Image (spheres, helix red, strand yellow):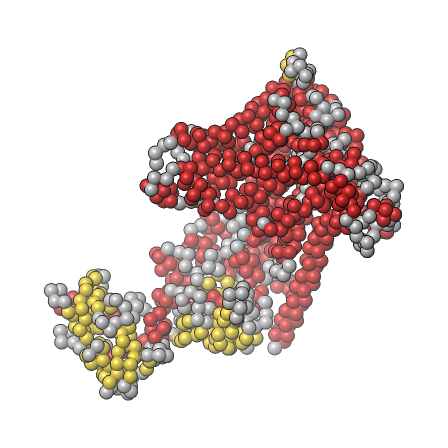
Amino acid sequence: MKIVLEHLTKKFPGRGKKNPGDVTAVNDFTCEIPDGELVGLLGPSGCGKSTTLNMICGLETPTDGKILFGDEDVTKLSPELRGVGMVFQNYALYPHLNVRQNIQFPLENLRGKDRLPKAEMEKRVSETAHLVQIEDLMDRKPRELSGGQQQRVAIARALVKFPRVLLLDEPLSNLDARLRLQTREEIRKIQKKTGITTVFVTHDQDEAMSICDRIAVMQNGVLMQQGRPQEVYDDPSSLFVAKFLGTPPINVFQGTVRGGKLFIGNQAVLPVPGIKDREVWAAIRPEGFVLQADGPLACHLERVEVMGRDVSVISSHNACTSQTLRSIISAESRAEIDMSSAEVRFSLKPGKVFLFEKETENRLRFERS
Amino acid sequence: MKRNNGKAWLYLLPALLFLIVFMVYPLIDVFIYSFEEGFNFASQTYFGTGLYNFSYVLHDPYFLQAVQNTFLLVIITVPVSTGLALLISVGLSSIKPLRELYQTVYFLPYVTNTLAVGLVFMILFQKTEYTDGLVNLVIELFGGNAVDFIDGPYWAKMFVLCFYTIWVVMPFKILVLTSALASVNQDYYKAARVDGTPKLRVFTRITLPMISPMIFYLVITGFIGAFKAYSDAVALFGTDLNAAGMNTIVGYVYDMLYGDSGGYPSYASAAAILLFAIVLTVTCINLLVSRKKVAI
Amino acid sequence: MEQQLDFEKMQRKTNRRGHVQKIVVYLFLSVWALIVLFPFYWMILTSVKSYGSYNAEHVPSFFTLSPTLQNYVDAFTTVPLLGYLLNTLIFTIGTTAIMIVVSTLAAYAFARLEFRGKNLLFTLFLSLMMIPSELVVITNFVTVTNLDMRNTFAGLILPSVTSVFYIYLLKENFEQVPDELYRAAKVDGTSDLKYLWKVMIPICRPTIVTVIILKIIECWNSYVWPRLITDDPSYYLVSNGIQEIRENGFGRENIPAMMAAVVVISVPLIILFLVFRRKIMAGVSRGGLKG
């Protein structure tokens, strides 16, 4: 089921005397989610991504704009009529019901012509349980399950009524780091197997990048950029998106463009044809640095961290907006670093350097050779 | 941390003194009283020891009347008040405007003097030679016959007593249940909404099991409270409850101790211990049932 | 498209049902509010009707056009209502004051001081909470009588002081004050008593105020013990006073004057409640007294 969001806006009335004005949680959000894809709504906490999800679900009514499932306008429909399945952040499993009863719960709500005979219900429950692999936990109570198992029960409960759309609100945030990796693969697999259009809210860019077909990055209620994870990563449209995606985070420098060249400090570090002379933010991905003895960018060497596969070089530079900058080089080139020297020099990969306007923080594109 | 035994006991001393003199000693003493036969209050002497006091109390028609009244009161008021409080609390939590106002109003009976407001109930229900009383006028309006609820037939008096008792205990129950309802995680309701769960089903399958510990707490404290009913009855029917036939077990204890029929601390003790035994038994049964029924 | 219309119809039906439900809920809540408020209204209304007009009404009217304060004058002159109020005031202040001092000291010992047998003693304390007052009242009555303290304030107040529950509540609250504060105070050479007075009590003031208010309510409404221990009307508290008024006061017929007395007795607590509404309700839901 294709989901289309058109100019979606949600305003909450201001609370109390201190801030009487409306709070805009989501502002003019327009986006199209193709059928069968797994889409990550990504952003820092409070950016309106959960509100967006709740509007898709029907728990919140938009102040303005439209929501379409396929061709059908569902903006004013209440959640049960939309055919959505939702997994809550804390799973919201009913503590007094066992796993089987929890999964069966939504089916028992069906009335009239949708009503299922008991045998059919049981069949659906066990099929769904099989899908998420919790068949041997069916008689347990939620509190007897681990976080990952609860998560899977919650997904099963959302899937059992064959929803047109599956919505996940921060599904991994309550799990520990290891389980998170495992569970996100699980979610990916289940989504591929069922082919249900899935929207997935997270503040963890790593999570979104790794499993989503498509991500939408939000800030302050506004959709900043959307696209395939790699596209967005390789071609951020704003400084915010560039900073938000990628671990370790991107390094941001104060730079100047003069005569088609990018200057960081006093050195011309990269030719940037097609950009007028101006002050810019220059953001360089950690993997955009190349060790080079006579490279144009000279940094003060702080230390080297060995991470097995590759090496991170921690250094500092006056023009860098953060105290230290981090570059990742392959383990083999480690020998090239002269640890006795206080200086380390890099040249830059043009494809990993992004320039942004100083004021608007919008992307300035230059021609890459 | 270093132990400061002496100082600690010094801080505890006043509380301990009060508790020992007015709670621990009396607690032991009441059992002794209950076995001393024919205790004479003036001379502080008694004839012998044994179970005569209990036997006397159990054969006293006033006591049996009090037991009957108390049990009726308990059986009627506890379920009715708990159920009503549940309905009201659910109603309260489903609305937003005026909620605080309703809550404040509902709590008022808690802070009023039972004896004083009892008088208002008395004049509302009483039938005198001047007026039939407001309640009777309403009954007559609907074509019924006026009944004197204060000095009339037993069922009428029992009705007023139950009504007033419920009126008095409701604030506490509503308060406890509304805060129990408020503490249920909203995500459960959201999940139920997404699944299109009908409201009644949300209530029976989600809300009720979630707040069942609080409901059982209310039932247990409600039983204990209702078994100890006394001042509500006095408020409505005056101090001579035996004459009105509306005495309660606690009332019987106090009447034995003091008042026109008083001066028998031994009988009073025996009755108090019997009451305690009844309350303990009922509470234990309650706890056993609740252990089986309460889901979480 | 047809399906779309179908959904819209269902949605409209759901919305309509929601409205109807809202109305039913408000109606139901209002009915109970009326049942709660009506006795208060009736009591105030009756108290401002004159004796003559009240008795002339076979069908009582729901309002009066000639309100009078004569009943209030009668309430204070014909029966010693002022005396009852004063007695209750003395009883309430005395009991609450002693209770709060005794309970604070004990709670402090349990929360902050270390001594042998602390856990055992505290368990015993807690088990005392389950003792019904009806069991101990008998001996207390005999004790006070034997000590010749009937019809004295000492006899009224002393047995009413103890309340294990408040010690428990204060102890729980005291324990939330971080240990570091105590250690810091000890380093500065602060005595325990000074620490309790200067640090503990100011920090835990909300709970202490709650406990005081709950105890005041309890005292103001107490009936059984005062009834047992006082038979001299000059020591009656309001609860006993109102009972006395009912049985021997204005004569059974002067109901307006009786209602005036009831209003006078009820008003102080209602004002207290309206001022400290949140505190009282929060305190009661943490562990009610009447239950």
Q: Nearer the viewer, residue C73 or A96?
A: C73
Q: Which quadrant is home to the C terminus of chain C?
A: top right
Left or right, C112 with respect to A366, comes to: right
Residue C123, placed above or below residue C213: above
- Rendered location of residue C142, percent (x, y): 63, 23
Q: Nearer the viewer, residue A332 or B137?
A: B137
Residue A84, placed above or below residue C231: below
| Residue for point 86% across, 46% down | C52
- Rendered location of residue B157, percent (x, y): 79, 38
Give the quarter of the image for residue C155: top right
- Rendered location of residue A185, percent (x, y): 38, 62
Residue B278, placed above or below residue B163: above
- Rendered location of residue A251, percent (x, y): 27, 71
| Residue for point 35% across, 79% down | A359
| Residue for point 66% across, 32% down | C226
Count of numbered marks: 0
Left or right, B293 with respect to A311, comes to: right
Left or right, C92 with respect to C263, comes to: left
Please say whether residue B37 is visible from this viewpoint.
Answer: no
| Residue for point 61% across, 77% down | C1
